[in-house]
Image: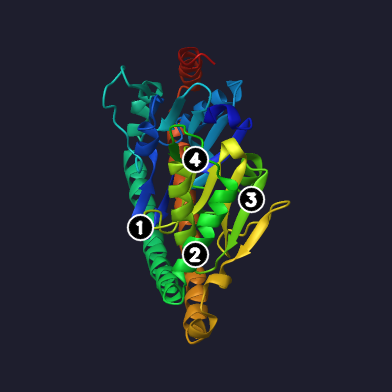
Amino acid sequence: MMENLYPKSVDFFLGTTTPAGFRGYFEELRREPGTQMYLVKSGPGCGKSTLMKRLAQMSGGPVQCIHCSSDPDSLDGVVFCEKKAAIVDATAPHTLEPAAPGADEVVVSLYHTLDTAALRKNKAEIKALFEKNAALRSRAARYITSAGSLVLDSRRTAACSTNFEKVRRYVKRLCARLLPRTGRQPAEQLRLLSAITPKGPVFYSSTAAALADKAIVFRDEYGAVSRLLLELIRAEALIRGYEIITCPCAMHPDEKIDHIFIPALRLAFLTDNSWHPVSLPGQQSVRCARFLDQENLAGYRARLRFNTRAAQELIQQAVALMAQAKACHDELESYYRAAVDFGAVEKVTRDCAALMGL
């Protein structure tokens, strides 16, 4: 079972701002077979992240800590691998409502811990901060959208110089060597290993080191080759009966996979580029330039350099705006923290722990 193959704790994201808007994988987590979901509902600064951190600490088994891309120091969820359970922040922008309340999901509400009278005294300030935060996040998203257009242009440009048949032959040989058929039922988890955050692009290389003893690292700045490599490896891994963790690209998650883990083999396939450089002990590096027609690509070098430089500058602007949004959110949280009964939050935490058998 995959849950027996994790180290004690690993870190992922489950959502991020992309060129197409916020993209989360909370629904996909809910659909993982046999997973009992706990949906936390409350306002900002009301103890959701603290509750989840406490439960993670109380767990005696391996957990996946799901970080918030708007504040990586805060948690959006915890997956308890051995218990087939997950608790997540079910408020915007990753709102989740129970499909079968009590039977399939448990709603963990913290709204009763709030002194609403105290909040109403600062209603105007609170509403203004919510609006300012939303405006800053919207501006940041526009910069990410512009950067995404340039990254996509580079990938399509490199694709015109890619020998796709050579890539397919390489993957066939690679999988025949590394992925013996198991005859078991395949399974897949979708997680993000990186995200654009107020701290800049964050990549959890520690998770890669924890989940894999062997890593095949594809060095590919433009993503055209690694996109096909990872698609083909994913398909082969599932056909051969493996349980895998698929990590989509944080910039274009619905179009491109960046990383794949196969915990049963302690094996990882990782993409290395300037957005998330990979340096692991004993990694096997594959330069994707070997699959490119360099002569044809040479005619586009100036365009590719411009795209890379401009995209990085746009992301820097997005990060600066996200940092402003976080500062705004921190101010918003201060109003809510002053109105929260944290003793009541602690009681909910203990009740959750008992319910989960922690």
Position above or below: 148 against 336: below
Extreme residue toward the right, this view: 281
Confirm or deny contact between disc 3 and disc 1 (CB under 8 A).
Answer: no
**What's the residue type where badge 1 is placed?**
Ser
In the image shown, does 60 or 328 lie closer to the viewer? 60
Q: Tell me what residue is drawn at x 60 percent, y 32 percent.
A: 6
User: Mark 4 highlights which residue?
Assistant: 244
Numbered label tally: 4
Q: Is residue 194 visible?
A: no
**What's the residue type where badge 2 is placed?**
Val
- Image quadrant where residue 9 sits: top right
User: Mark 2 highlights which residue?
Assistant: 167
Extreme residue toward the left, this view: 99
Q: For numbered disc 1, what is the local secondary structure? A: helix
Q: If you read the primary sequence from the N terminus, does the residue marked by circle 3 or circle 1 appear first?
A: 1
Q: If you read the primary sequence from the N terminus, does the residue marked by circle 4 or circle 3 appear first?
A: 3
Between disc 3 and disc 1, the foreground one is 3
Between disc 4 and disc 1, the foreground one is 4
Measure the C-alpha gap from mark 3 to mark 1. 37 Å
Q: For numbered disc 4, what is the local secondary structure? A: strand
Measure the C-alpha gap from mark 1 to mark 2. 39 Å
The C terminus lies in which quarter of the figure?
A: top right
Q: If you read the primary sequence from the N terminus, does the residue marked by circle 3 or circle 2 appear first?
A: 2
**What's the residue type where badge 4 is placed?**
Ile
